[in-house]
Image (cartoon, helix red, strand yellow):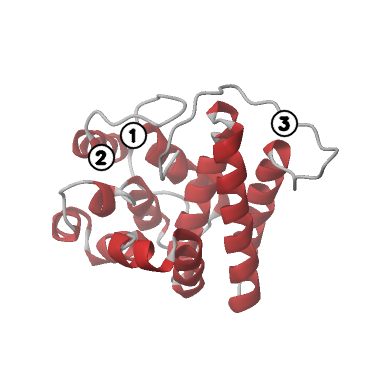
Amino acid sequence: MTKECCLNKEEYLAAIELMKNWTGLKTRAFSLSPYWVHPIRVAALVSKYKKSHIIDELIIAALFHDIVEDTSHTAEEIESLYGPLVSSLVVELTSIKSIQDAMGKTQYLSKKLSELSSWALVIKLCDRLDNVSDFCFAPQKFIDKYAKETLSILSYIEAKRTLSDTHKKIIVDIRAMVAIYYQETTPDAAPMPVCMTAETDVENI
């Protein structure tokens, strides 16, 4: 059984305002837009791709998916406001940076995504889709690195786990977006144009 989003406008806007307050004044590395634009777009993508009896919880989890990882706020705070399902999804989506650093980011995320719940994977794939949609603002060096990482992760999870039709649709769109900006380098290949050339060493775009 599926349902449309039941959050009313006031509830949705209240969640957005809280998320904006919790993320503070961070900006996206290359577009320089407020960071909170990203989780709003991820939530919108979840709403676009996923039909579910828990769509409200998925949308809220998408809004808060980076909070535990990137701020001082906790899963307990999220649970007190939005319940254990939202909190558990956010915890699933939170990377443990010490392990990621030890394993290497690509290997860590490949394994992590292969083990996520189906619901959490929808959010994570929407997160990745929004990130690659910002390639227009990034230098080619970053695009090449992030695109290779993305394609490697996608290939791994396609080989290692069962994917739903929703997962597959998002993956198709991630690959399509990556293909606009990235191709395997060959001796005769000309560099792809990008919107900016300044280099920034960041983990998230």
Task: Estimate the x, y position of residue 142 in percent, counting from the top left.
Answer: 54, 39
Label 3 sits on what residue type? Answer: Met
Q: Is residue 193 above or below residue 40?
A: above
Q: Residue at x 21, y 32 (%)?
A: 24
Task: Estimate the x, y position of residue 81 in percent, counting from the top left.
Answer: 17, 53
Q: How many marks?
A: 3
Task: Estimate the x, y position of residue 198 in percent, counting from the top left.
Answer: 50, 24
Residue in front for this viewpoint, 181 or 21: 181
* Labels 1 & 2 near each other (Cβ < 8 A): yes
Identify the element where label 1 is drawn: loop
Label 2 sits on what residue type? Answer: Met
Identify the element where label 3 is drawn: loop
Whether residue 107 sits left or right of residue 74 in the image: it is right
Query: Mark 3 or mark 2: which comes first in sequence?
Result: 2
Label 1 sits on what residue type? Answer: Trp
Which picture quadrant has residue 123? bottom left
User: Which residue is the site of mark 3?
Assistant: 192
User: Which residue is the site of mark 2?
Assistant: 19
* Circle on res. 36: 1
Identify the element where label 2 is drawn: helix
Whether residue 152 sits left or right of residue 82 in the image: it is right
Circle 3 residues within 10 Å: few <14, some 14–19, many ≥20 = few
Q: Is residue 86 above or below residue 38?
A: below
